[in-house]
Image (cartoon, rainbow, N blue to C red):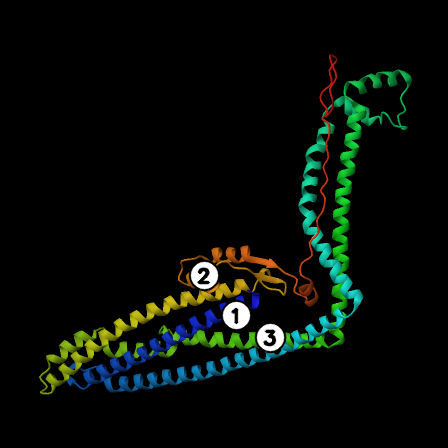
Amino acid sequence: MTPETLIGLAERNSRNVELMKRTTEQELSDLTWQQLALEQDISTRLGSIAALHLEHGNAADSQVSVALQARKDAREQLDQQLQAAEQQVADALSAKQAAQARYEGIDQQARERLEQDAEYARQVAQLDQTQAEHREHISGYLELREEYAKKRPTFDVDPIYCYLRSHRFGTEHYQRNRLHLAMDRWLAKQVNYAANRKNELSLIAMGERNESLQLERQTLIEQLSSSIDAQLKQAREQLGLTALHGDVCATEAAIDTAKARANTLQKQLADYALNQDPHYLRTRELLTEQLKTRSLGELVDLASQTPDTADDRIVEQLQTLHVRLVSMKADQAALKQHQQALQTRYERAKELQRKLRNEAFTGSDVYFDLSTDFEELMARYMEGDVTLGRLIDALNQARTIVRRSQAAAQRGFVSATTTSYSFTTTTVTASNAAGKSDGF
């Protein structure tokens, strides 16, 4: 699975959750509107009963109606602005896809043109082979490095051996007098100096050779990569890919701007769904002023006690409306709970999107070989059965790096076999006057 497919599935998941969230928010907003209208209807019927003497009842009814209409108009305006912003996002995405398609087409054209160059093809083949050899040798390199680090300190343990070595015994640089020479020869026999010194020098040569070969491979890889990248960059520039890259960046900036605008509008609309918008707060304030501190149930009881001959019909209507209001509030509470659950799912989906846009999960050479269906794994993550960390770990374990140039794809992977080094050493032991040691 390519990074583009992976990100595409995550984006589709986010869009689906966002659509469900917006649908629920719209239903919640509509239900809130109906609730406000129902409360206004109840207040109007109560206002017709003179015995209740609602303070400024008619004026308050008029103000509430104006506030409700203003809220409706403001929400419709936000809906229209959101639709326009989402259209801008869609247009910018289309422009980006078109620019990206042109970019990839020119990039492929540049690669194909270069692959006709024998020297470029030779360098690509040499780079693939060198990288394969590097992967083949790396374990042996590390083993020899560890062996050197483990054995090298053993030659610094015996003080007699270190003493002879410091005076460069056995070499042309030894400059001590005959008396010291005779004594040093005797000491050298006690610690088997000649054999141990030979082993130490062999170990040092092995370590230096190991590091030298590793450096040569790394240097060659860097040189070949730099040369190939430079040729590819030049070929892209000749075909105008550099200028097109600016167009791709411009479309990405336009997408970010349009998305930011859409997110701002969605946040404002979410305030309407949660009854936190200023219009709703003003309407609620007016109704509270109108009904004072009495609940609707208390006002219904008061209405039933008035001597008006039409009270029976009004009370019956109010009781029916009150039952509807209680049911509507229960539905609203359920919708709010569902909306909050969808908001949580939406945030999880967006968090997954952001994680997948990380550099570790992008690039033309990245491929994911998942043993588990990603959509199933993502669904379990959305339900909370799988943590984001576990999902990311699964992707990290499935991630492989594959060079996807056309030439390399035709040739396949190049592997190389190598022969590892094996060294034996002798161990230095403390000298004693009683006998001789066989070495390190």
Q: Is residue 311 left or right of residue 360?
A: left
Q: Nearer the viewer, mark 3 or mark 2?
A: 2
Q: Which residue is mark 1?
A: 8
Inter-mark Cα distance, 1 to 3: 20 Å
**Quadrant location, the N terminus:** bottom right
Residue in the image at 71% along x and 22% along y: 429
Inter-mark Cα distance, 3 to 2: 32 Å
Q: Which residue is mark 2?
A: 377
Q: Is residue 212 left or right of residue 66?
A: right
Residue 253's label in the rendered image is 3
Residue in the image at 71% along x and 29% along y: 154
Q: Secondary structure at mark 3?
A: helix
* First in residue order: circle 1 vs circle 3: 1
- Where is residue 204? Give x, y as percent: 77, 36
* First in residue order: circle 3 vs circle 2: 3
Nearest the viewer among 31 and 305 is: 31
